[in-house]
Amino acid sequence: MMEILTDRVTRYLLRRIRRLAVLDLYQHAAVAGLLDEIAYDAGGSTGPTMISRWSPTVELMHLLSLGDQGKQILARRLGHAGQHADSLAEHWQSQQAPAAAAREARTSSMSSLVSSSACDTELERQAASERKALAVLREQQPLPKAAPVAVALLIARAVGSHPGGWEALRSILRRPDPFIVMRIPVPGFQRHCGRSLEDGLIIPSWMKLDELVRLAGICDYGDRRPGKLRKRIKTIAGSEVHKISDRALSRALSDAVNSEPPPPILLVDQTNQDLPEIIMHAADLVLEADGLDHTLLSELLQICCGIAPKQSLALMREKGLTLDHLHLDDLALIVRPGRSSAEIVSAFEALREDRASDLESGDGEGSDGSGRRKSSGVPEWRSGAKPEEKRKSAGSATVEVIRPQPADAEAVLRVETLSGYGEAADWATSLKLDLDLWRNGLLDWSELSSRLLLSGPPGIGKTTFARALCNTLQVPLLATSVARWLEASYLGDVLKSINAAFTVASEHRPAILFVDEIDNLGSRASGDSRGHKGHDDYWASLINRVLELIDGAAKTEGVIIVAATNLPEKLDPALLRSGRLERHVQIPRPDIDALTGILAHHLGTDLAKVIETAPKSDTFDVTQVDGKLEPDATKSSVEHIPVNAKASGSRRNTV
């Protein structure tokens, strides 16, 4: 059976991981006094090349002479007690046979050149004894860590799915300065991919990762293994690229390409966002793969824990386990030798409930103020917290994430229960139907009306509408305002706050991004109207960035934008053009019918008692129909209803 490219790359990457594991094992044994390291110059063509030769000490030879007892002592000395080679997974074991066969072939070839003198025969016996000792030592090699193995499996899938085949890939990878984009939507992939590069686990070289753009690199690993000759590569994180202006990004790429010698460039992206056009056009190679799935996870458990794939697959399917919430750090913590498949899957289930709605783009998502994540393994609304409570989103204090209340909960604020919103309510109803079609793949996102500007006098209920829309559509509400963006004052920090708001919206999609007080941006046509004469460039930069991000969000499926203002006439006209906030709805003050519905909504079951306490009048004839007052009620009669009567504590003011 012909080996597919994915399997071939998987075998190669696992061999790289095993090579580093053997090196670490030898160094650990040297510290424990079991090996001696002798460094010598191999005389490479490019200069001095130092290579280590490892030889067993007398102590190691003595332990091996004790048989099984000596091996047990050896395992304790190395800290690997309880981990035996016979528990290694098939993929992990298969890396030992080719290497052992190659060593034996080299040994036989060298032996044929050695004379048959007694001295040479003794040297051969000593060499054979040392090789046997090193082979026994390698049996103590621990099972591999989950994170680098997961990175290897994901990269192998990305390479194997490339339509060009191996020959096309090899021709690009052999270039001295390739520009490669790797897109794998798994939280934490960027950082762990950088670690694997630095440790020489992806290509046969130790790498030094330089940031293409400052503070936008893929790894914070540092030089954990000093003294290694490293090749340099320029890197950039896909999660950070949207925070960089197109001009700055083009300039950085141009400087790298025109340097001498030009370095390789690698962009690693763990998000689902669209990358800038300049990236996609300039890249020599784009490798893409899906995220974690049951097959990949079962293979990971086989390699790292020796668990049979059929066993783990059956358990995951039985539990209906989903994996899109998992971070590679989660795999590193949970997938460890000695754990059963039931323990691992149970841990993943607990994380699913805790993080299914809080996917990690950064490492601090879902943490409290101290940076530590809540320890509860159940959703917040099951542990006593209200689902509508505000929670600050990681990476930006300018955005508050409000979760929708369950659709079957009592007294849920929904657009359907509001009165007086007219066109806005009709827009929300249509959007709900279209969103269901989009989720089922029956409607393209570009066909949805997903941009709305609400205007009206203060206190008319624009924020309330956004909250109700969150519950109607059953998607998160990401609340922010221009005033929060401007708290930073300095232009660079303000732009970062604006970028962060749209980034958070993209990470939580489908979601509603609600931007309040958008009139604070003003218009580029007249800086004097804002009272900031002489700072037009500052405000123009802000408006241009908001326009650019709205355009990008329009192309990003799942992001609904609702903006609110009291003064629509102060907005820049470009904000209202097609593809931006093209649907403008003015919310008027409530009329009699709207006031009647509002009072009925707030009073609820208390309405009948309120009517009973109303002053008697010949002209007052009000009854309750379907939770609302009869529309025949006159304004004077409605005003006589004691509106200070206590309503349910869960209800809020509608306007």
Image: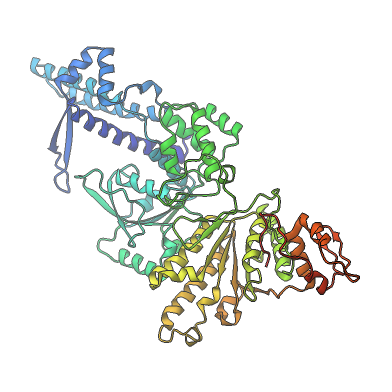
Split into 4 quadrants, where in the image is the C terminus? bottom right
Query: Is 359 in front, or is 569?
Result: 569
**x, y percentage for residue 499?**
46, 65
Number of numbered discs on residues: 0
- Which quadrant of the structure image shows residue 595? bottom right
Q: Does residue 245 appear left or right of residue 198 in this picture? A: right
Residue 637 visible in the current orientation: yes
Residue drawn 46% across the image and 79% down it: 540
**x, y percentage for residue 81?**
32, 22
**x, y percentage for residue 343?**
49, 29
Query: Is 127 in front, or is 213?
Result: 213
* Image vertical order of residue 402 relative to residue 294, above or below: below
Q: Does residue 161 appear left or right of residue 99 in this picture? A: right
Query: Is 511 in front, or is 447?
Result: 511
**x, y percentage for residue 191?**
38, 49
Residue 446 visible in the current orientation: no
Q: How is the image coloured?
A: rainbow
Residue drawn 53% across the image and 37% down it: 350
- Which quadrant of the structure image shows residue 130? top left
* Image vertical order of residue 264 relative to residue 312, above or below: below
